[in-house]
Amino acid sequence: MAINKLGVETVPVLVGPVSYLLLSKLAKGVDKSFDLLSLLPKVIPIYNAAYAGLESTLSGLNVLVETYFADVPAEAYKTLTSLKGVTAFGFDLIRGTKTIDLIKSSFPKGKYLFAGVVDGRNIWANDLAASLITLQSLEGVVGKDKLVVSTSCSLLHTAVDLVNETKLDAEIKSWLAFAAQKVVEVDALAKALAGQKNESFFSANAAALSSRRSSPRVTNESVQKAAAALKGSDHRRATEVSTRLDAQQKKLNLPILPTTTIGSFPQTVELRRVRREYKAKKISEEDYVKAIKEEIKKVVDIQEDLDIDVLVHGEPERNDMVEYFGEQLSGFAFTANGWVQSYGSRCVKPPIIYGDVSRPKPMTVFWSSTAQSMTKRPMKGMLTGPVTILNWFFVRNDQPRHETCYQIALAIKDEVEDLEKGGIGVIQIDEAALREGLPLRKAEHSFYLDWAVHSFRITNCGVQDSTQIHTHMCYSNFNDNIHSIIDMDADVITIENSRSDEKLLSVFREGVKYGAGIGPRVYDIHSPRIASTDEIADRINKMLAVLEQNILWVNPDCGLKTRKYTEVKPALKNMVHAAKLIRSQLASAK
Ligand code: GLN
Ligand code: ZN
């Protein structure tokens, strides 16, 4: 610890050498099998210099090794806790429940234990009584003056301060703890451990937890029943994908290499103004609907002019692909200022799933059927899938994540079936964030992928053969998870492979059998650069070298929301040209 210039005691934090190397990316051209840890001997002297430098500035350096986000494997625990020059070890005891047993079976004498009992990654109030029991039992192992109470990880992934929340009602607020409240919890636990228990704080906490457990807002009997009834079946569509694709083709009559887009069209300043004013009740519902309809018509006309085969409505009514659904489902709450860092300097405001999830009424049917009525071409219904909703929200911690995911899946299933009844023959269920939920430990991947893929299948297992189900995945590391992706059993999958064409192609070269429709990106929407017809045609040809022509789709790699019309129109024009060019080449080659 050190006293900084403001007189505050602080702990300087460094990323340790092993994490530093393992989190590094291999430069282009470096062989995949390169062992990052072989660089340790080069990195360690730099760390040594850094620690020595710190030591001379901060008198008597104490090193704390902090691990988080998962259990520490038994082998690693042994190595770690035998480190000599370390004063303290910190563990995530929320995601690392097995680590508690390791600590109890052996912990080095004279070292400090930083016990991460307050979850740093969620927004829920801690169960203080339970944490205190855990801490007391750990104190018996490591010794009275050697136990430090801590959060399970840094507070980067939680919201900042509940004080800023004006929208949440008092009951829900009492169930929550953001970063500022978590620090208070840590302090209260440490004081309680030292015999200065703040009884009223602890009893207020117990009361809040019991109100959460018994609140009718949390439990919805019929949702619980429906989710429980899912057990034992794996929810697959009745027929094989090849049979379904035939039935769909009869109805849709698409050319080979059908063209489509991923969903959103550019979100203009005007569009944002309309949504904002409607939300603030500055414009009437009638005016709002009229404005959105006009926007949809514009997007439909553009796509017809471009001669795209399967159209989208452009998602003008959606501020965000997950929040839009959260707002219409029950069991969700929204914060006014619950921002967290997503990546780089991007921040998001995840909604909170606090209760059983249900869908009171159709969410997208009105807009999708309105859009379908404007064109004779197939209009894709556009939904966000259960796994993506789960992975981008703050999720309740009073039941396993997969149970919550199944509940969301059932709500989306209702929507899929209503869209089908409403005359929508192609429905895309986005699973943009499927990969983001992969657990840290490889050993846990298959369990996650099983329930994630199952959740996706639940959403569309009830539709007719002739209804075409698409899914879209961002940053999907197709190669690693190819078998899970096939197991999703979608009719068509569009994927973002912007930075790894070669990698994607290699899966198919290596002989993975893929019979459903597939739309790898033919151009990158993350760049304003407009790909030429030749460039796109070249890409399609590369794909055709490894994929059957009757399963290949032509589409950009993601939604067009962040681009301008001046970029989108010429890019799509080139895309359609390229598809037509290759269609005619294929026809004349016959
Ligand atoms: N349908 C969404 C869109 O087009 C998908 C976005 C995403 O994959 N992130 O915006
Ligand atoms: Zn995407």
Image (cartoon, rainbow, N blue to C red):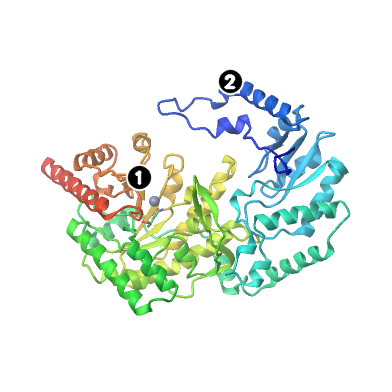
**Label located before the other in sequence (1 or 2):** 2
Can the viewer see residue 120 in this picture? Answer: yes
Residue 134 vertical position relative to residue 170 in the rendered view, above or below:
above
Q: Can you give x and y, in whole percent of width and height, for residue 68 in the image?
A: 65, 43
User: Which of labels 1 and 2 is toward the front?
Assistant: 2
Residue for point 57% across, 57% down: 402
- CB of mark 2 near ligand 2 (< 8 Å): no
Few, some or many residues within 10 Å of mark 1 (<14, 14–19, 20+): some
Closer to the camera in the image, 327 or 496: 327
Tell me, yes or no, whether the two marked residues, 1 and 2, touch with CB atoms within 8 Å.
Answer: no
Three-letter code, disc 2: Lys
Closer to the camera in the image, 555 or 561: 561
Q: Is residue 588 left or right of residue 352?
A: left
Regarding mark 2 in the picture, which secondary structure is present there? helix
Q: Quadrant of the C terminus?
A: top left
Residue for point 21% across, 63% down: 301
Residue for point 21% across, 67% down: 376
Three-letter code, disc 1: Tyr
Instruction: State the mark number for residue 42.
Output: 2
- CB of mark 1 near ligand 2 (< 8 Å): no
Closer to the camera in the image, 38 or 271: 271
User: What residue did someone put label 1 on?
Assistant: 514
Q: Is residue 262 left or right of residue 581?
A: right
Q: How many marks?
A: 2
Regarding mark 1 in the picture, which secondary structure is present there? loop
Can the viewer see residue 232 in this picture? Answer: no
Marks 1 and 2, Cα distance to the nearest angstrom? 44 Å
Q: Can you give x and y, in whole percent of width and height, for residue 253 in the image?
A: 21, 59
Residue 374 vertical position relative to residue 576 in the rendered view, above or below:
below
Closer to the camera in the image, 172 or 406: 172
Of all residues, the one furthest to the left in this rendering is: 588
